[in-house]
Structure formats: C-alpha cells, structure tokens
Amino acid sequence: MFCQEQFPGGHLTSIPNQNIHMHLMSLILKENGAYTRTWMGGLRLDSHRFIWMDGSPWSYDDWLPGEPNDTAGVEDCVEVLGNGKFNDFTCWEPQAFICSFPLDTCAGKSVTSCLSA
C-alpha cells in the first residue's frame, strides 16, 4: 500500500531476472550499509503459485534451499534475505522494502523532491 500511495502506479518491486536481482542486492547494501531482509512484490496465490504484484511473469527465482515451505500455511509473501535468497514469509512483519514505479511519476522532479512528495 505504501508504494501505491506514494507513487502513482507504484508497487513492491519484482525480480524478473538475475541482473535485476544483483542490482537490487547492491541497492540494499548501499542504502542500509548491510544486507538486510527486504520485502519484494511476490505473492502466493491460493493455487500455491507465485506471482509478481506488478503483473510481470514469474520466470526467475532464487529460493533458499527448502523454500518456499509455507510454514503453518501463513507464508504468502516473498522477502529477499541478506544472502540474496528468496524466502516465503508472513506478510505482516515490518521490514525494509523496495518500491518500483513508472519513471514518468517523477518526471521533471529531483530524486529528493520525488521521494519526499
């Protein structure tokens, strides 16, 4: 919800390929000073299939061994752990996140003014 409220067309980011995955891990390290658990825009459907909230195809993943395991039947969201591996987890845990949004959302604005809007 935060991403949608702050940026028209915004959503938690997807990881459609290894290149994006590595860029996002670099961003996490740069912004936090360390790798940290971070929400991504992956969601488990009732069919137990995963989708990206932005509608992009689920064509890449890098699950931690033994994951996804849907512990207690309540792990429906996707986080990236400090080691870069995907993990399914409960959706209500507060932690870092990365928003993606269309570039035209901030057209003509500096990054600072866009992010503080």
Image: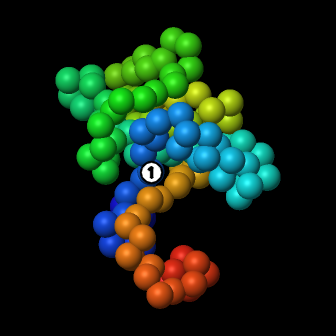
Q: In the displayed structure, would residue 82 be above or below residue 96?
A: above
Quarter residue 88 falls in: top left
| Position of residue 89 measured from the top left corner of the image (x, y, whole percent) | 47, 32
| Vertical order, 26 against 88 (above or below) | below
Residue 95 in picture, x, y percent from top left = 58, 49
Q: Report the quarter where the N terminus lies.
A: bottom left
**Observer able to see residue 91:** no
Nearer to us in this view, 22 or 36: 22
Q: Is residue 75 left or right of residue 33?
A: left
The percent coordinates of residue 49 (x first, y second) are 27, 25
Q: Residue at x 73, y 49 (%)?
A: 29
Residue most extreme to the right: 33
Q: Is mark 1 on a helix, strand or loop?
A: loop
Task: Identify which amino acid the numbered label 1 is placed on.
Answer: Thr
Residue at 62%, 40% in the rendered image? 22
Could you classify mark 1 by the number of other residues whose Cα lies within 10 Å: few (under 14), some (14-19), or many (20 or more)?
many
Q: Nearer the viewer, residue 58 or 70?
A: 58
Residue sitting at x 68%, y 47%: 26
The residue closer to the viewer here, 43 or 84, is 84
Q: What color scheme is it?
A: rainbow
Q: In which quarter of the image is residue 37?
A: top right
> What residue is disc 1 on?
13
